Image (spheres, rainbow, N blue to C red):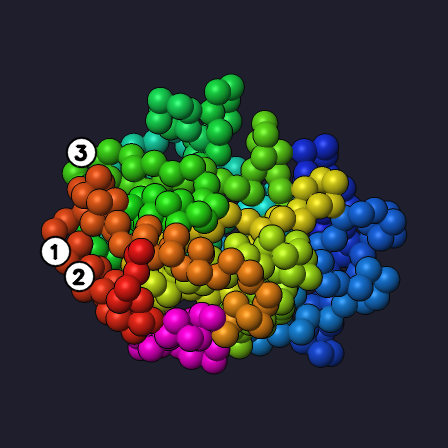
Amino acid sequence: MNPIQSLEVAFDLGDGAFPVGRLAIDEERNVAVFEHDPRFISSKLRVNPFFEENELIVARAPTFYNRLHGVFSDSLPDAWGRLIMRRKLAAQGIDYGSLGPLDKLALVGTRGMGALIYRPDADEPAAVPEVPDLDTLANESLKILEGENSESIIQLERLGGSSGGARPKLLVFMNDDAEIRTHSQSGFSPWIVKFRHTSDPIDAGPLEAAYADMARAAGIRVSSTRLIPSACGPGYFATQRFDRGIGGARLHMVSAAAVFDVEWDGAAVDYTQLLNMARAVVGHSGVEEIFRRMLFNVLSTNRDDHARQHAFLMDKAGTWSLAPAYDLTFSYGRNGQHYLAVNNKGNEITVGDIRHVAREHSIKNTDEIINEVAQAVDRFKEFAESYDVLPETQLLAERQLRDRFNELGLAGYPR
């Protein structure tokens, strides 16, 4: 690959490409700079709700975001995507690690998450079967994670290389009968199918399906979900994509971490900052939703709850909304700490801390929210059994959930 000096950035919001601006690397400062297209400035659209449209914008956290602005770094593949892209390019004699950030965005081209697209597009289309064999691809993804070679690397990269997260994923299309296709067609909508990581329990799919239902019972917005049967395991968790709208129209998506341009893999952001951002971007309704998620994540021991696990969406009219909750499952977190601190605490969070945050952000119906969330989490066993979560996994999670009830001082809940 010839090194790319600059990229044209555009939105694909369903009406063809709309220019956003130009992205380049300032070699002297070794950092990305972005300049808006004049046509974009006069529109109601925004690539980041906090960007100044008429300025040359320098990336604010270049060390963490590969010299890029957070909103563009969001387009790059995450741990799984990087791994299979690295393997795919290595077979062509290309070292992915030697590529610059613009080269990597060019490889994403038009098939990233959200609505951002990049030109020139260095992506090379690859043919994939119309009907994927999920069991084969799940097994092949485990081989890749364990360092083995796989003949399915091209197919796995093509179907899931632009997705985020550490777990292998497929970006596919599904109909109401749970039939899956790799290409868009009438009656099929965009979905994500997740495979387990080598570090996950064997019933990771059923567990995440149970958590999705539990979150809905707690009054949290979650995209449609399903558990896809498997002939060689407990099944695969699938969720409808929320970065795609009616007819497959794309929505611009930016994570909270990218809006802030701060490191998500650490303690740079807490729930107070996230709640303030929600108020600024979408108003008080977003504040109440984030507060409800905060309580749910703490009470259900979903500690892998960082600023990249929350996102905002923008439609073609320029209207911003809070993305549905995602990646909800049981997680110990790093060193037993909750990524997003609650009242400056990463563990041993009490109901007093929850109430402090509620007062700080003018949450009026705090008791009602606490009761609704506590009642839903208290039903974990019911949700887990409905998806045949293994007894040992249930027991492990239930013990932690009881500990959270006790830590929060919610022994009297649900009531």
Residue at disc 2, secondary structure: helix
Quadrant of the frame with the C terminus: bottom left
Asked whether the beta carbons under mark 1 and mark 3 sit within 8 Å of each other, the answer is no
The residue nearer to you, when weighing 169 against 121, is: 169
Name the amino acid, label 2: Leu
Asked if labels 2 and 1 touch by Cβ distance under 8 angstroms, the answer is: yes
Q: Nearer the N terminus, badge 1 or badge 3?
A: 3
Residue at point 34% right, 43% down?
213
- Three-letter code, disc 1: Glu
Q: What is the distance, in whole Å, between disc 1 and disc 2 at their CAs?
A: 6 Å
Residue 302's spot in the image, x, y percent? 35, 62
Q: Which amino acid, by three-letter code, is at mark 3?
A: Ala
Q: Which residue is mark 1?
A: 392
The residue positioned 48% from the left and 77% from the top of the image is: 343
- x then y, percent, for residue 345: 42, 79
Circle 3 Cα neighbour tier, 10 Å, few/some/many (<14 / 14–19 / ≥20):
few
Residue displayed at 52% across by 37% down: 125
Name the image quarter holding the N terminus. bottom right
Query: Which of pointers 3 and 2 indicates the residue nearer the eye?
Result: 2
Q: Which residue is mark 3?
A: 231
Picture layout, residue 151 above or below residue 62? above
Among numbered discs 3 and 2, the one appearing first in the sequence = 3
Between label 1 and label 3, give the one nearer the viewer. 1
In 3D space, how far apart are the residues under numbered discs 3 and 2 (Cα atoms)? 26 Å
Quadrant housing residue 201: bottom left
Badge 2: few (under 14), some or many (20 or more) residues near its Cα, within 10 Å? few
In the picture, measured across the screen, residue 55 lies left or right of residue 240, that is: right
Could you tell me residue 33's position as x and y percent?
74, 67
Q: Which residues are magenta?
A: 335-355
Tell me the element at label 3: loop
| Residue receiving disc 2 | 396
Residue sitting nearer the eye, 388 or 88: 388
